[in-house]
Image (cartoon, coloured by chain):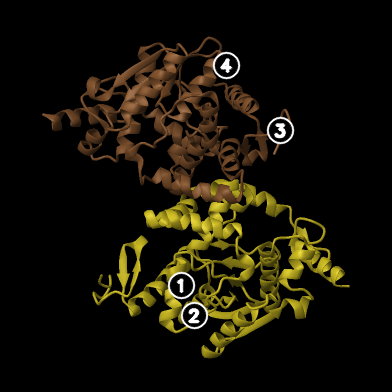
Chain colours: A yellow, B brown
Amino acid sequence: MKCRRCRQPAVIEVRRHNAGFCADCFVRHCREQVRRTLDDYEMIGPGDRVLVAVSGGKDSLALWDILLDLDVRADGLYLGLGIEGYSDSSATCARAFATGRSARLVEVDLPRDFGYDIPTGARTARRAPCSACGLSKRHLFNRAAVDGGYDVVATGHNLDDEAAVLFGNVLRWASDYLGRQLPVLPASDGFVRKVKPLVRLGERETAAYCVLRGIDYIVEECPMAAGNKHLGYKEALNAIEDQSPGTKSAFYFGFLDRVSAMFTPAARAEREGLRACAHCGAPTTGEVCAFCKLVDRAARTGD
Amino acid sequence: MKCRRCRQPAVIEVRRHNAGFCADCFVRHCREQVRRTLDDYEMIGPGDRVLVAVSGGKDSLALWDILLDLDVRADGLYLGLGIEGYSDSSATCARAFATGRSARLVEVDLPRDFGYDIPTGARTARRAPCSACGLSKRHLFNRAAVDGGYDVVATGHNLDDEAAVLFGNVLRWASDYLGRQLPVLPASDGFVRKVKPLVRLGERETAAYCVLRGIDYIVEECPMAAGNKHLGYKEALNAIEDQSPGTKSAFYFGFLDRVSAMFTPAARAEREGLRACAHCGAPTTGEVCAFCKLVDRAARTGD
């Protein structure tokens, strides 16, 4: 197979595009896919300061790398989750990348700054680890962005992630989630804008991008995620994608183009009921936000 | 595990209901699920004459059996598809059941009555076999019902079938199909009412029902279906259902209860564009219906 662009021998095949790329053209292809996504969804305005949620994995490091190459003012935020045998290695990758690119990495550490780690927090709050982790991330990325004067939080969700999340939401027909599963969520009271610039790239592609760019990333999945539903949804979609390349992309972008607006009212209704958390001021549907409850429970159990 | 109803030892477990049943109670359970479906969706009115689409497989024979037990006036229609090593055995099962229950079985034979079989028809019309077969069945079941003065065509689509079809339609966001993926389609010009009374039963359950009732059905899948997309969707959903029993049911009934109406306008718009086929008078979007085109092509190639 030859490179779609320069006709040199291809080193990467992207089956859903029915195309191969040489190393240089593939890197350019990834960059252009992100550029196109930023433009199509008006993700980042001129002069916007962007905080990239950096896990140390292939997606977030590829995202940060591409944004920097596109001259976006992008700092990174690394959140230490206190997961043994995982958090140390992922922090090392995040720091090495930041140093290599002379980029600014902000660090927040759950055990040091909030007195709990994900395994303990999940147990005491009686949540699944991935639920406690997602809650902590959403809250703290937004808080760090507000506190640091950033306009945008950018996350490394790729096409496979978004298709799997969409699949999970569709299986339950979770109208409120479906109404806000968009690649850009506008800023609103207490929330900065959130964007997902990698939705046109699959996870094989972000991995290949990092390898070709010499970016050292943590290859292991988080050990707490093993057996979660999200991975089951990914596997199910992968089996179908194998048989019919392009299915995931048609599923996700078909939803964005033709269906998501049908669910907007449900999502808007939920957001209109938000008020400030009595502890931290973050937007919440209750008296105290779920994050403050988690921190509180973890602290009381630690006593 | 004990029977949910009578506390005798259970012989069948239905995981999504988290329940076991003894043989007698399971048969009653299946009958009640169908009764409830008929009632909830007002599928069959008093005195309605019903034509059951009988393939000789577990679903259609279980359906016919249950409808007869519920005192519905139900005849069967068997359509000979001319598929070697499959059609003969399935016809034998259909005829044996009809004889055993003293029920009336109408037979239509594609090769004898229309001059083509599914393998040839699909090849000459350049359609996938399952597409040519579905098209032929939809057309001929409706025509036989209209000609025979039946009010309703009943098909044996079960929960697994409907969830897999829904999944396929959702992956493509096929609005027109989503708008009419209902367990009952009302009669309209040229179409009799169509109902799917088995949507509350999974395929393991219809198989167990037939075994417990001593109904001899063709166990083999149709050989032409091997590797089709529908089976891929079923496998993907089965993997998820294994991990989270009840997912399929929540997916399908959640769609019916909360989502399908959103897609009704798209389906209605398509149906409003229908007119009579110039050859056979059946409703169609074009000048000549897809079935007449298929028959015509098959005949010309046969010359």
Query: In this picture, is B31 found above or below A174?
Result: above
The quarter of the image holding the C terminus of chain A is: bottom right
Q: Are marks 1 and 2 on the same chain?
A: yes
Residue sitting nearer the eye, A250 or B234: B234
Q: In the image, what residue type sits under mark 1?
A: Thr
> The numbered mark 4 sits on a residue in which chain?
B
Label placed on residue A65 = 2
In three-dimensional space, the C-alpha distance between marks 1 and 2, rounded to whole angstroms, equals: 11 Å
Query: In this picture, is B159 found above or below A191?
Result: above
In three-dimensional space, the C-alpha distance between marks 1 and 3, rounded to whole angstroms, equals: 51 Å
The residue singled out by tag 3 in the image is B4
In three-dimensional space, the C-alpha distance between marks 4 and 3, rounded to whole angstroms, equals: 23 Å
Contact, mark 4 vs mark 2 (Cβ under 8 Å): no
The residue singled out by tag 1 in the image is A206
* Residue that appears at 39% across and 57% down: A242
Which type of secondary structure does the marked residue at label 1 adopt?
helix
Dot 1 or dot 2, earlier in sequence: 2
Q: Are marks 2 and 3 on the same chain?
A: no
> The numbered mark 1 sits on a residue in which chain?
A
In three-dimensional space, the C-alpha distance between marks 2 and 3, rounded to whole angstroms, equals: 59 Å
Q: Residues within 10 Å of mark 2 (few under 14, many from 20)?
A: many
> The numbered mark 3 sits on a residue in which chain?
B
Q: Is residue A31 visible?
A: yes
The quarter of the image holding the N terminus of chain A is: bottom left
In three-dimensional space, the C-alpha distance between marks 4 and 2, rounded to whole angstroms, equals: 67 Å
Foreground: disc 4 or disc 2: 4
> The numbered mark 2 sits on a residue in which chain?
A
